[in-house]
């Protein structure tokens, strides 16, 4: 049975919040809302204007990943009450994720994200293509694949 013996408990009383605490909490929620809205508007503007501004694809990837991390951090910090934890616990939770995100960004920028595109099994290697064409072939190197767009055969899609 409810502590207040009614169907509709006063949640402010259950949380032991005074009116001053409630105002402070609501102010924080509105600040987070406006912050997230501003970041989202900036992302949309950059996304719409990227081509006309001549922004590179790499810049856009890093920009959007960065802003997504900023928004996620704001949400975790406020709504998941990370701000209320001790500094040690915050760092213990955030450092592994930060390290993983840095790793992913490095893999994208170093080209490791394109490994499967460079080593496709459905595209014949230069060696296989030379055998098909009857050309004399030299030693085969690992990873020698023909271009994906079949330009060597003169085919254009």
Image (cartoon, rainbow, N blue to C red):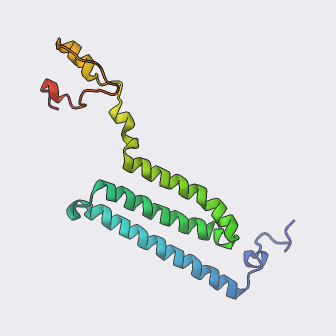
Residue 152 relative to residue 28: left or right: left
Q: Position of residue 119 (x, y in %)?
A: 35, 30
Residue 115 on image: x %, y %: 38, 37
Above or below, 136 against 116 in this view is: above
Instruction: Name the one closer to the observer, 10 or 113.
Output: 113
Residue drawn at (29%, 25%), measured in percent from left and top? Answer: 123
**Residue at the spot 47% in from the left edge and 50% down from the top edge:** 104
**Which residue is at the front of the view, 119 or 25?**
119
Left or right of residue 110: residue 1 = right
Tell which residue pokes out farthest to the top in this image.
134
Figure disc tally: 0
Residue 156, by quadrant, is top left
Q: Quadrant of residue 84?
A: bottom right
Q: Quadrant of the N terminus?
A: bottom right
For the C terminus, the quadrant is top left
In the image, residue 121 lies at what x, y percent? 36, 24
Image quadrant assignment for residue 25 = bottom right
The residue lying furthest to the front in this view is 139
Residue at x 59%, y 59% (from the top left corner): 95
Residue 53 percent across, percent down from the top left:
22, 65
Q: Does 22 appear above or below 134?
A: below
In the image, farthest residue toward the bottom: 20
User: Looking at this view, is 59 or 36 the one in front?
Assistant: 59
Specify whether 102 is left or right of 3: left
């Amino acid at each position: 049975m409810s502590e207040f013996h009614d169907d509709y408990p006063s949640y402010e009383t259950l949380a032991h919040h005074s009116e001053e605490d409630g105002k402070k909490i609501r102010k924080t929620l509105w600040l987070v809302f406006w912050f997230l809205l501003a970041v989202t508007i900036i992302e949309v503007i950059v996304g719409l204007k990227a081509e006309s501004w001549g922004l590179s694809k790499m810049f856009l990837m890093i920009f959007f990943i960065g802003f997504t991390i900023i928004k996620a951090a704001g949400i975790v910090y406020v709504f998941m009450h990370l701000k209320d934890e001790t500094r040690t616990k915050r760092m213990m939770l955030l450092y592994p994720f930060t390290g993983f995100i840095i790793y992913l960004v490095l893999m994208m920028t170093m080209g490791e994200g394109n490994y499967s595109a460079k080593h496709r099994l459905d595209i014949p290697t230069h060696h296989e293509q030379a055998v098909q064409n009857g050309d004399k072939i030299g030693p085969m190197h690992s990873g020698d694949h023909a271009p994906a767009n079949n330009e060597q055969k003169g085919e254009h899609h």
